[in-house]
Image (cartoon, grey):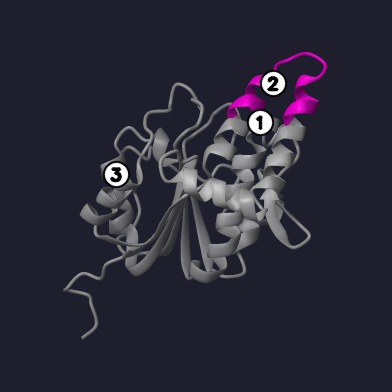
């Protein structure tokens, strides 16, 4: 990663030893805090278990997970779109993820693809490229939204079911280790309503903040967890996936 000394937390921050969404509205909109908190919890839990060696952060943005994985890896390579208006000082490579990646075969032990796949016009090509540049038995961690508003327009192309994610992983040479919904109906309703309320004069932002906070507390309760998990089967807020690259016969150890 370029300019590591200049890196600072952005979308995600540590508070009381746990990663969560930033409360700075310039980094995470008020109506998106609940979703971002769930994403932060997933990566905070699993990067420590799976991140290792050479890590590739695809669609890295401001590299918001750097603090969560830097102690577990040897180095990290940051790749994203070129943005001439706001230069990304952390980029090692500016690349179109719809095209073949100008990276070496079997170089990376870990790949992160967070909130990116829905913005890719050629997702199967990207899956094949991730497999190509990943070392055998390397690990992919990704998340995607499902019941979620259109964002990063006009580059918002797809929503994926768990069946689509599993199929693309399988056909690209990955073995799924974990594939779960991220939130259910309580999270979806709160997300939609709070995003609408933010635009209401005077009381909107305060009400949206209260909704996000109260639902966050509710889904940590016994009843809240049960409702969220049960409804997520048919109404997923999003999905998280962890997959291992299957070693090819030519390189697998006997």
Residue linked to disc 1: 31
| Mark positioned earlier in the residue sequence (2 or 1) | 1
Please indicate whether residue 16 sits to the left or right of residue 73 in the image: right
Range of residues picked out in magenta: 192-208
Between the C-alphas of marks 3 and 1, the distance is 27 Å
Q: Circle 3 — which element? A: helix
| Mark positioned earlier in the residue sequence (3 or 1) | 1
How dense is the environment of label 2, judged by Cα within 10 Å: few (below 14), some, or many (20 and up)?
many
Residue 96 point in image, percent of width and height = 38, 37
Residue linked to disc 2: 197
Which residue occupies 32% across, 32% down?
121
Residue furthest top in the image: 201
How dense is the environment of label 1, judged by Cα within 10 Å: few (below 14), some, or many (20 and up)?
many
**Closest to the observer, 165 or 235:** 235
State which quadrant residue 1 falls in. Answer: bottom right
Please indicate whether residue 17 sits to the left or right of residue 235 in the image: right
Quadrant of the snapshot with the C terminus: bottom left
Taking the image as drawn, is residue 10 in sight? no
């Amino acid at each position: 990663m370029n300019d590591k000394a200049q890196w600072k937390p952005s979308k995600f921050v540590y508070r009381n030893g746990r990663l969560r969404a930033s409360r700075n509205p310039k980094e995470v909109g008020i109506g998106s805090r609940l979703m971002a908190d769930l994403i932060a919890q997933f990566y905070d839990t699993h990067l420590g278990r799976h991140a290792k060696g050479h890590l590739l952060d695809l669609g890295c943005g401001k590299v918001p997970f750097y603090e969560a994985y830097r102690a577990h890896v040897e180095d990290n390579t940051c790749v994203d779109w070129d943005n001439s208006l706001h230069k990304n000082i952390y980029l090692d490579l500016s690349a179109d993820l719809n095209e073949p990646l100008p990276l070496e075969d079997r170089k990376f032990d870990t790949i992160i693809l967070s909130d990116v796949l829905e913005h890719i016009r050629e997702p199967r090509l990207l899956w094949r490229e991730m497999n190509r540049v990943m070392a055998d038995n390397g690990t992919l961690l990704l998340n995607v939204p499902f019941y979620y508003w259109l964002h990063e327009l006009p580059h918002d192309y797809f929503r994926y079911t768990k069946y689509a994610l599993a199929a693309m992983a399988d056909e690209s040479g990955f073995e799924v280790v974990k594939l779960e919904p991220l939130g259910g109906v309580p999270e979806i309703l709160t997300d939609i309503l709070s995003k609408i309320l933010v635009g209401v004069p005077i009381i909107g932002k305060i009400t949206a903040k209260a909704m996000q906070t109260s639902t966050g507390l509710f889904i940590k309760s016994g009843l809240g967890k049960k409702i969220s998990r049960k409804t997520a089967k048919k109404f997923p807020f999003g999905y998280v996936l962890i997959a291992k690259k299957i070693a090819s016969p030519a390189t697998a150890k006997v």
